[in-house]
Amino acid sequence: MSQGLAFLIWLLCVGISAVLIGYFLKNSLKPLIQEGFVVKACPSGTNSFITDSGETQCCNGDVVDGYCTGNLRCTLSPRSKSGLPTCTDLAASDAAATGASKCPPAMPHYFGCPTTIEGCSSSPPSANGLQPSNPLQPQCILYKTQAEDLVKLDSCYNVLQNSQKDARCVAAQATANLPACARAAADAAAPAPTAAGPTCSPPPLSNFIITGDWVGARIPVQQRYIQANGNIVYAIQHGQHVKIVVTDKNNITITARNYVGLINELSSRASDMAKVNIMADSTGHYILGTAP
């Protein structure tokens, strides 16, 4: 082989190596962005135990002789033979519910935990749920006190107030730009709110859904009822059953129940937790989530 040909082969190999090294460095130096949750422990206040089939479940109560004496919350196993939601799904649902109740629409993703910093972001939370997956996206802070919410410019409260103010200004400007007759016609044409009849399900609350293996779909919440202690009851009419999920004031899921009847009976059936607790237990079979 001539020296010229050997040099050309060597040069080609060096070029290919340089391209491969450059591609590797380009991809390896990218910031790692993880979305969703990776939950490896049972929720706070629950006890883990291993079933006879080898599944790790979380019990909202005491575990006696390998059996849960309370409600089963979730499973740490990737697949559940009992139909329980995974603790990862439950954590994601709780965060989504918190985001829907506290976060501005432009920053719907909740991150953090009550004992440290909490906030909302345009990007989904990281794998541990404690910070945004992309710190360069817009975010705001959920401060611990109302006083801080009012004075801190980066508080989610002020972000939400500013966005609502901007929306009202845009709507008012659009109406002001209409000729007087067209503006009056537009006001007259605005539909008046209608109440649901006694035999009809109320219109869905578009921010929330109830889903799970006993529902079989993502059904928009049709009724919301606030108890005297601040707990919130979300409900759907599902055939002859009304299926409910009860949360605390921060929309963190407490339990799920169902009864046979109509959804317009909800206010009398779920006026307090004592009445909720006598309903059929459904915890673990459906949970509260956010739409879509």
Image (cartoon, rainbow, N blue to C red):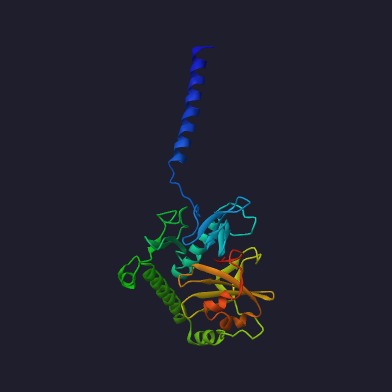
Q: Position of residue 47 (x, y in %)?
A: 51, 58
Q: Position of residue 178 (x, y in %)?
A: 48, 81
Q: Position of residue 109 (x, y in %)?
A: 46, 62
Above or below, comparing residue 41 to residue 98 in the picture: above
Q: Quadrant of the C terminus?
A: bottom right
Q: Is residue 290 visible?
A: no
Residue at point 32% right, 67% down? 153
Exactly how many numbered labels are in the figure? 0
Residue at point 61% right, 83% down? 265
Q: Is residue 71 visible?
A: yes
Q: Quadrant of the N terminus?
A: top right
Above or below, comparing residue 169 to residue 48 in the picture: below
Nearest the viewer among 178 and 40 is: 40
Q: Is residue 210 left or right of residue 34?
A: right
Nearest the viewer among 93 and 156 is: 93
Residue at point 31% right, 69% down? 148
